[in-house]
Image (tube, rainbow, N blue to C red):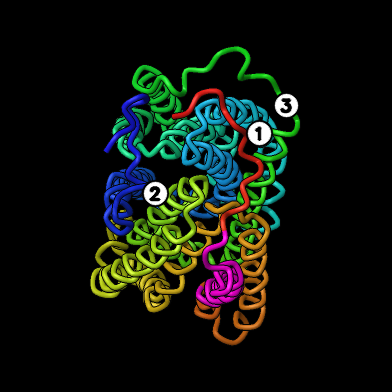
């Protein structure tokens, strides 16, 4: 079903919850899997055509990468939740103003994060005990990624807007374009131009920028609703604050999680480049098989955001239950893949087969696969709370994750070695889940059933979607 005036889908508000959750998720999942596959291709190209130390250098920056890029993506995702709520409320002018505010805030955020990232990159690598034999590769790779962060923010902003309006397909097409372009540019930079690690990083930035520009142009031509006028770009502090109240806690939650991973990486770096290489390869496999969880997270933000804007509490509750069931089904599949095929996947990243590196990576996969159910629940409940405007508790969930991961590393590294460090990850997931479930129970307690949502911030618009 579509809104005749805007040609935008409104199934989030009308279709059976589990059906629309699956339908909306599939294009996102395809895109995320494609993105992870080209990320894996990146790692395979670097590991096989450049070297294992270069691969470990890239892996050593993964947490730092997520620290800054995660902040940017969290903020952009948070801003788009406001757009989804306005769309669910049928407020056309509110949608336009929200999109314009997202663009202005994201532009400022890009400049700030690029400068901050470039200034702190080397000190952070030192703090994380990055091994000297991989330090130069890690430094050059992360510097290029940080300086090109505007491309990542731009792509996530425009794709977030499209998802907020119920379109999960358009960004898929341009993500595929970005993925294919990235692999081609990787090969060109490494094999033809001999640019090594720097070439791989530049390929990522350039391909994402081209994809973002093309996606934005296409979206403007297809959806008149996001064609903005000069008046929409008035910077009104009250509107900016409302976006920031949702976007920045989401950004902080991403970054706090990244800090926890950086702490884990720092403890792990002490065990040498072979352990880091094994963990890096295993992390790529983990990221691939857990994409259904990340996809559901994005879907639940949009689903809950639109239905919250429409004031439909019961539909939100039904959707969350459906999301959890779907998630647990994907958990079983992801766990089985890691347990049965983990070693084969890890070996793809190595120029020459090294049983030690493979064993280091496989041990991590086996540990986290057993606890994927915690990660799945974490994604669904956290994003659902964010979709209905909750910001503080999901952010505090990230703080709890950080504390639990740090405590786990400190307590278990000396006793169990790198295995103890691996175990800190499911400990962090479980700790955050307990907090989020407690908040969920409070919000949806039985005695509140039937009460309308408080949505005083939604203004009446002279035009309705």
Secondary structure of the residue carrying tag 3 is: loop
**Mark 3 or 1, which is nearer the eye?**
3
Q: Residue at x 52, y 64 (%)?
A: 450
Rendered-image quadrant of the N terminus: top left
Where's residue 395, x and y in %? Answer: 65, 59
List the single residue furthest toward the right.
237
Quadrant of the rendered image containing residue 214: top left
Q: Looking at the picture, does residue 182 appear above or below residue 57?
A: above
Helix, strand or loop at label 2? It is loop
- Residue 372 in sight in this render: yes
Label 2 or label 3, whichever comes before in sequence order:
2
Mark 2 and mark 1: Cα distance apart in space: 35 Å
Badge 3 crowding class, 10 Å Cα cut-off, few under 14, some 14 to 19, many 20 or more, is few
Magenta stretch in the rendered image: 426-451
**Alpha carbon distance from label 3 to label 1:** 17 Å
Q: Which residue is mark 3?
A: 236
Above or below 349: residue 448: below
Residue nearest the viewer, comparing 113 with 75: 75
Residue most toward the top?
230
Residue 286 forms part of the magenta stretch: no
Real-space CA distance between mark 2 and mark 3, rounded to the nearest whole angstrom = 51 Å
Mark earlier in primary sequence (2, 1): 2
**Of the pair 210 and 446, the residue shown nearer to us:** 446
Whichever of callouts 3 and 1 sits on the residue coming sooner in the sequence is: 1
Residue designated by label 1: 109
Q: Is residue 141 visible?
A: no
Q: Which residue is mark 2?
A: 51
């Amino acid at each position: 079903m579509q809104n005749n005036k805007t040609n935008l889908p409104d199934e989030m508000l009308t279709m059976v919850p589990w059906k629309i959750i699956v339908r909306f998720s599939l294009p996102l999942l395809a895109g995320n899997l494609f993105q992870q596959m080209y990320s894996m291709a990146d790692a395979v190209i670097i590991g096989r055509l450049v070297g294992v130390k270069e691969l470990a250098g890239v892996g050593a920056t993964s947490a730092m990468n997520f620290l800054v890029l995660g902040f940017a993506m969290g903020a952009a995702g948070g801003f788009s939740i406001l757009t989804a709520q306005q769309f669910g409320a049928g407020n056309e002018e509110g949608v336009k103003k929200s999109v314009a505010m997202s663009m202005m805030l994201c532009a400022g955020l890009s400049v700030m994060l690029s400068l901050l990232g470039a200034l702190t990159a080397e000190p952070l690598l030192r703090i994380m005990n990055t091994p000297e034999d991989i330090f130069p590769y890690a430094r050059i790779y992360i510097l290029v990624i940080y300086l090109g962060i505007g491309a990542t923010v731009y792509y996530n902003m425009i794709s977030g807007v499209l998802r907020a309006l119920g379109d999960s397909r358009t960004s898929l097409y341009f993500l595929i374009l970005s993925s294919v372009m990235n692999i081609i540019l990787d090969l060109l930079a490494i094999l033809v131009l001999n640019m090594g690690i720097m070439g791989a990083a530049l390929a990522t930035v350039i391909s994402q920028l081209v994809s973002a520009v093309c996606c934005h142009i296409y979206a403007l031509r297809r959806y008149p609703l996001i064609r903005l006028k000069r008046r929409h770009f008035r910077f009104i502090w009250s509107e900016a604050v409302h976006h920031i109240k949702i976007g920045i806690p989401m950004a902080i939650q991403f970054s706090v999680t990244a800090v926890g991973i950086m702490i884990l990486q720092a403890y792990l770096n002490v065990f040498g480049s072979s352990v880091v290489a094994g963990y890096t390869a295993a992390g790529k496999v983990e990221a691939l098989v857990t994409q259904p969880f990340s996809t559901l997270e994005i879907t639940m933000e949009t689903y809950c955001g639109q239905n919250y804007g429409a004031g439909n509490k019961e539909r939100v509750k039904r959707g969350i239950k459906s999301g959890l069931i779907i998630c647990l089904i994907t958990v079983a599949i992801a766990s089985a893949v890691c347990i049965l095929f983990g070693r084969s996947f890890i070996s793809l990243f190595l120029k020459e087969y090294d049983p030690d590196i493979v064993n280091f990576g496989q041990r991590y996969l086996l540990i986290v696969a057993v606890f994927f159910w915690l990660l799945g629940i974490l994604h669904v409940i956290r994003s659902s709370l964010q979709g209905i405007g909750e910001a503080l508790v999901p952010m505090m969930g990230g703080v709890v994750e950080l504390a639990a991961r740090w405590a786990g590393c400190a307590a278990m590294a000396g006793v169990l070695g790198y295995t103890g460090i691996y175990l800190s990850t499911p400990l962090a997931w479980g700790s955050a889940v307990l907090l989020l479930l407690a908040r969920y129970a409070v919000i949806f307690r039985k005695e509140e059933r039937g009460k309308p949502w408080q949505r005083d911030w939604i203004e009446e618009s002279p035009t309705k979607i």
